[in-house]
Image (cartoon, grey):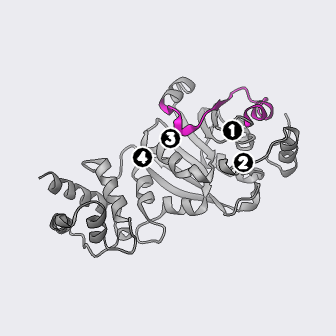
Amino acid sequence: MRKDIATPQYTKSILDKHKFTFKKSLGQNFLIDRNILDKIVATAGVGSDTGVIEIGPGIGSLTEQIAKKARKVTAFEIDQRLIPILKDTLSDYPHVKIIHQDVLEADLQEVIAQEFSGFDDLMVVANLPYYVTTPIILKLLTERLPIRGIVVMIQKEVANRMAAEPGTKDYGSLSIAVQYYAVAKSEVKVPKTVFVPQPNVDSSVISLTLREQPPVHVEDEDFFFEVVRSSFAQRRKTLLNNLQNNLFTKEQKLLIQEALNDTEIDGKRRGETLSIEEFARLSNALLKLKLC
């Protein structure tokens, strides 16, 4: 077996060998710390029966550590230049498959059916590019894939927002969108010094354990998320003003006030003070009155 990819020296030798140059537009930052990689794999609970979907494997540093534990790994890589490099670096792992495709354009249900038929334990594990973190995670969650969960390295500020609780500065529509589908927990803080090249910000490993059912009942999911987004449109404004300005008309102010009264929610509160349960009650009440 060759030495681990995730060392500064070996990473540099791979990059030099293939004359690889980083593309800022793809958010390429490769991990060079084996300890962090081990923590990611351990957090994901990857075992001999686990199938893993990886996104953005780079030169394969995380892929390699996942492959040492997992039954099978299928990784999506958007950069054509990395495909031959991955073929080289991961040649010792025949149970790793690289798909040259943008994961945002992939039919993940179909990929899972083809690549992981008969698997009872499936995880998404990745070091995600910062610039597409949110779209990728929301795709993974909203498509209701047959996965146990998601463990990803992302920008620390975004991880804080995803795991935030009501009443905190990080709590917002992203917190609710993620926590509707999963239990979010920020697991490991990661300094920018363990990447090549170094990003401008620190990172965090976040775990998202998928829920069997959402924590609240909503009559219309799309409308629920519209209410949530509208409530955070301007954080300094009150709940009543945000809903009036962004979801309803001034003429419908009485409808909003009636829904607030019915749910015993003070319209002078700000969106960040409402729990997901309160947002569910409010959206159901607003929908009922809107349809009347």
**Residue at 45% over, 66% down:** 171
Q: Position of residue 285 (x, y in %)?
A: 20, 58
Q: Label 2, label 4: how many angstroms apart (C-alpha)?
A: 36 Å
Disc 1 packing (10 Å; few <14; some 14–19; many ≥20): some
Q: Label 3, label 2: how many angstroms apart (C-alpha)?
A: 32 Å
Looking at the rendered image, the disc whose residue lies closer to the viewer, 1 or 3, is 1
* Three-letter code, disc 3: Arg
Secondary structure under the numbered disc 2 in the rendered image: loop
Q: Position of residue 259 (x, y in %)?
A: 18, 64
- Of labels 3 and 2, earlier in sequence is 2
- Of labels 1 and 2, earlier in sequence is 2
* Three-letter code, disc 2: Lys
Disc 1 target residue: 79
Between residue 57 and residue 148, name the one nearer to us: 57
Residue 213, numbered circle: none
Asked if disc 3 and disc 2 are in contact, CB closer than 8 Å, the reply is: no
Disc 2 target residue: 23
Disc 3 target residue: 148
Q: Per the image, is 258 magenta?
A: no
Secondary structure under the numbered disc 4 in the rendered image: loop
Q: Quick check: 198 left or right of 260?
A: right
Asked if disc 1 and disc 2 are in contact, CB closer than 8 Å, the reply is: yes
Secondary structure under the numbered disc 3 in the rendered image: loop
Disc 4 target residue: 211
- Of labels 1 and 3, earlier in sequence is 1
Looking at the rendered image, the disc whose residue lies closer to the viewer, 2 or 4, is 2
Q: Label 3, label 4: how many angstroms apart (C-alpha)?
A: 9 Å
Looking at the rendered image, the disc whose residue lies closer to the viewer, 3 or 2, is 2
Q: For the magenta stretch, what is the residue range?
A: 82-109
Q: Position of residue 36 (x, y in %)?
A: 71, 53
Q: Label 1, label 4: how many angstroms apart (C-alpha)?
A: 33 Å
